[in-house]
Image (cartoon, coloured by chain):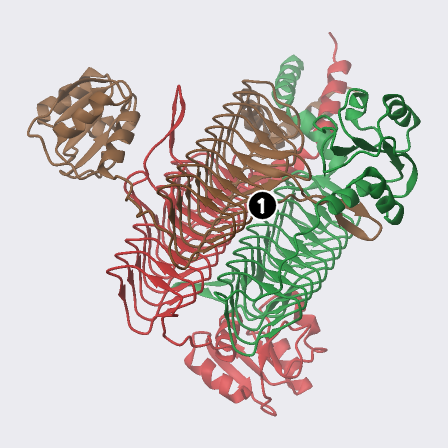
Chain colours: A brown, B green, C red
């Protein structure tokens, strides 16, 4: 695609195109990082990006720049086609999407798929090889169900969903519009509910359901369990990474982001816009307020106020944790100092 | 189902029914938490449950109560049908089970299933679509094997098992009676055994097997590896949650509970009745005594005495850890105090 | 197999056979640990192995010993056939391999497999039941693809690969020679890349690919994501355990070992020969030098120098961490000591 076509795209997009120079209007085939980009590739820089100093020596065919005059000057002097936008990352996303359009799936039900009774399948749905769909299910229009997916009975898949290969959706689960469930993830399996008795653990039946609201994306090999009663709910626009555990009865707000290997225990309530970094753990039944940011490996044992930035285990304010961690390294010295002081004191 | 039918059930159950009032004998369709229950739903309270104060305003059709007179008085005054039992949680489990009977699978082998040579399949076994069973396997009576499950050769599945969609059982594995293996879990894969050499890592063949005893339940996307020689063994009645790693040669006792994202390294020996909370890690070859409780994110590096309650990383007694963690937050202040003391001392 | 045949094997192997005594030349069927070995089993000891004291009472049919005269003397006096080698563990691996030859898969494409257009399949490839391979793929000679594997379009699987049941390979991924991908693992799925906007998270298209070099082994239920642009790369000979997360754009060196539940965030660069123990986390974009060893649960937030041995969270040198952890347990006492000193000081 010619650079001028990408400029037309950016004019209509969300990135805020401010100025540009098409130059020799190169053919752009794909995106790359500034260091690795070749003549048929486009790259981008953001304000303060450490790669900026490599702009002069880069081999990219074109570049998306932030509002930073020194950078556009370098591009001009190099004869490198450029576009200045308010949000270079958004621009790059729009360009990548245009250069790599999702390959259109032919809307067909593969003959090896096994579909149960009373299943409603919307228009333009693609169902891949060896898919299995149980009785009394619905699949909304424009959804893609890749090979090997298993959907138990009584499941509702919304419109515009993409269910990747070998994921499994258990009875009663419902997804909203435009959700993406990645490979091998399991939605709606029985929660881990057992009652201690003299004869060992007695299973608590898990009769609730899982509800995934609109625009949710869930990574590979994650698990979202259904509860004993009621629901587990993932709020609108929430994004969940690979290998994440969402236990029975958890409720998450809208637009949360949960990185890989996060684990949220039963009944926890997560607010809107919460960000949990990798390997964070949340104890059962705690409430995490709107906008909380928990750094990686954080262990959340108690309710957290909205807007808090927390770290450590148990979680404390991030700034305090940074100072405490710095002091942790000095513990042997502190101990020694105390011993010496004690010795020096008159008895 | 009418409330009086549920009362009949509780009379025969394990919860210890003590007294009840059927009132208008409402039709009960499902269970719910006290806050959310409607007129056709039943709920329960336990002693000291913080929801108790909501009993008066609840909309449930009936309620299961602990031995606590003020609660049954409220129910009486509301005209709310109730049952008082010794163990409300057990009663609720029995009621949920009755209201949500497991949908009977027709005992059939789906025509798309691929079954190897010399496979013995018991009475009333259900084998779903696209299942693959290797040569020389046995599947015990009344077992259900859901869609997409892959069983390698030389595997024994006991009677009354339920293997959920897309789980995988590797050669030599054996399960006991009444086990449940959840979706996408892998049993009996090769352990992570490599020998460092000058030419890189050399694989140690993993020729052992995995044995799952009776009444074991294993969550989604977990992995239980087979060892180089001998066996990996999960004891009778042990319950394992999602995303748990059990490495090669681990032996667990009976009636353990392991929450999500627990990892147990090679050759560790876990006693009976051990509880490991979420994200706990156990180092290779350590011995964890009977009845040990390890709180979430705990890291167990050394042998642990029976009955210990431990926390932190490395694990220390829980009570000590709580005090140490409280002091960790004060480390910057402690450091400052020491500096000031040092300054004030005569030199 | 007779013990003298195993001796012949060891003569040709890499373990460095030094001396041996065939004795009654027992029939050896399998390997076992010294404690559990029976008369038809072989076992091994390494220098300093605590099981050495059990050699005299063992029931093994034959034993592989290190260069340690007291041990061969015991074997002689027991009449126990033995072999002394430089590296007993290598010898045991060679023996196990011989006693448990990989069952030869018949090179066939199962009739239930669904193969796309323009797929090149090498000689002697075995493709199991219900496998699905997309368009424009290559599968190298001698590779085994087990039941239920899903390969998307534009994937290259090298020669001599083994892809275990239900693993999933996403578009653009390439594996080298002799790789093993274990069950339910997902290679090449979309990285977790989202841009915060006023309307919520906006997806960054993930147009890059995953490259797995030669002799790589990846455990069960792991996930290796593709990046927005460029590649995610796993270096030659690297071994990855179960439930490991490798995020988009991570580059690992050669011959690394990553234990279960390790998580490496986006863009991190891992050197050659790096060992990450269980549940270690690596933050995005950090550089971990060649030969670094990180102990279990370690959290790596900053670049790490080559050869460092690190522990804790945030990671510090292992020796320092051991001392700091020992002092952590004494924090309540330290606090008390400081208070008492403060009181005793003149004001």
x and y, in percent, of residue C173 in the image: 32, 52
Q: Is residue B308 visible?
A: no
Q: Residue at x 65, y 52 (%)?
A: B103
Q: Residue furthest left?
A: A24
**Left or right of A84 on screen, residue C320:** right
x and y, in percent, of residue B290 in the image: 78, 52
Q: Answer with the quarter of the image where residue C121 lies.
A: bottom left
Q: Answer with the quarter of the image where residue A37 lies.
A: top left
Q: Residue furthest bottom?
A: C24
Q: Answer with the quarter of the image where residue C131 lies.
A: bottom left
Q: Which quarter of the image is occupied by the C terminus of chain C?
A: top right
Q: Residue at x 30, y 26 (%)?
A: A90
Q: Nearer the viewer, residue A299 or B118?
A: B118
Vertical side of A3 occupied by B99: above or below = below
x and y, in percent, of residue B241 in the image: 63, 48
Q: Secondary structure at mark 1?
A: loop
Q: Residues within 10 Å of mark 1 (few under 14, many from 20)?
A: many
Q: Nearer the viewer, residue A293 or C311?
A: A293
Q: Nearer the viewer, residue A230 or A96?
A: A230
Which residue matches tag 1? A171
Q: Is residue C131 visible?
A: yes
Vertical side of B53 occupied by A335: above or below = below
Give me the chain letter of mark 1: A
Q: Nearer the viewer, residue B29 or A32?
A: B29
Vertical side of B242 occupied by A227: above or below = above
x and y, in percent, of residue C178 in the image: 36, 65
Vertical side of A38 occupied by C16: above or below = below
């Amino acid at each position: 695609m010619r650079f001028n076509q990408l400029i037309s795209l950016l004019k209509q997009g969300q990135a805020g195109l401010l100025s540009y120079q098409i130059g020799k209007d190169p053919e752009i085939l794909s995106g790359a990082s500034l260091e690795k980009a070749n003549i048929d590739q486009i790259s981008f820089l953001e304000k303060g990006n450490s790669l900026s100093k490599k702009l002069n020596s880069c081999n990219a065919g074109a570049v998306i720049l932030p509002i930073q005059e020194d950078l556009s000057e370098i591009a001009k002097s190099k004869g490198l086609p450029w576009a200045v936008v308010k949000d270079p990352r958004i621009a790059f996303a729009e360009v990548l999407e245009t250069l790599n359009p999702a390959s259109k799936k032919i809307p067909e039900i593969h003959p090896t798929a096994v579909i149960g009774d009373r299943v409603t399948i919307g228009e333009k749905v693609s169902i891949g090889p060896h898919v299995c769909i149980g009785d009394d299910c619905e699949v909304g229009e424009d959804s893609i169900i890749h090979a090997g997916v298993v959907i138990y009975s009584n499941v509702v898949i919304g419109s515009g969903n993409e269910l990747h290969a070998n994921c499994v959706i258990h009875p009663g689960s419902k997804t909203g519009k435009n959700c993406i469930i990645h490979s091998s993830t399991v939605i709606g399996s029985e929660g881990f509910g057992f009652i201690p008795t003299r004869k060992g653990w007695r299973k608590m039946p898990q009769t609730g359901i899982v509800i995934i609201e609109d625009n949710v994306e869930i990574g590979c090999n994650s698990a979202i369990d259904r509860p004993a009663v009621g629901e587990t709910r993932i709020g609108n626009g929430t994004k969940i990474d690979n290998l994440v555990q969402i236990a029975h009865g958890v409720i998450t707000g809208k637009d949360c982001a949960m990185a890989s290997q996060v684990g949220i225990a039963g009944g926890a309530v997560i607010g809107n816009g919460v960000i949990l970094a990798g390997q964070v753990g949340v104890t059962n039944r705690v409430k995490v307020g709107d906008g909380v940011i928990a750094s990686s490996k954080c262990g959340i044992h108690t309710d957290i106020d909205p807007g808090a930035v927390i770290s450590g285990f148990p979680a404390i304010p991030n700034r305090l944790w940074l100072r405490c961690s710095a002091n942790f390294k000095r513990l042997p010295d502190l101990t020694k100092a105390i011993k010496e002081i004690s010795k020096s004191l008159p008895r």
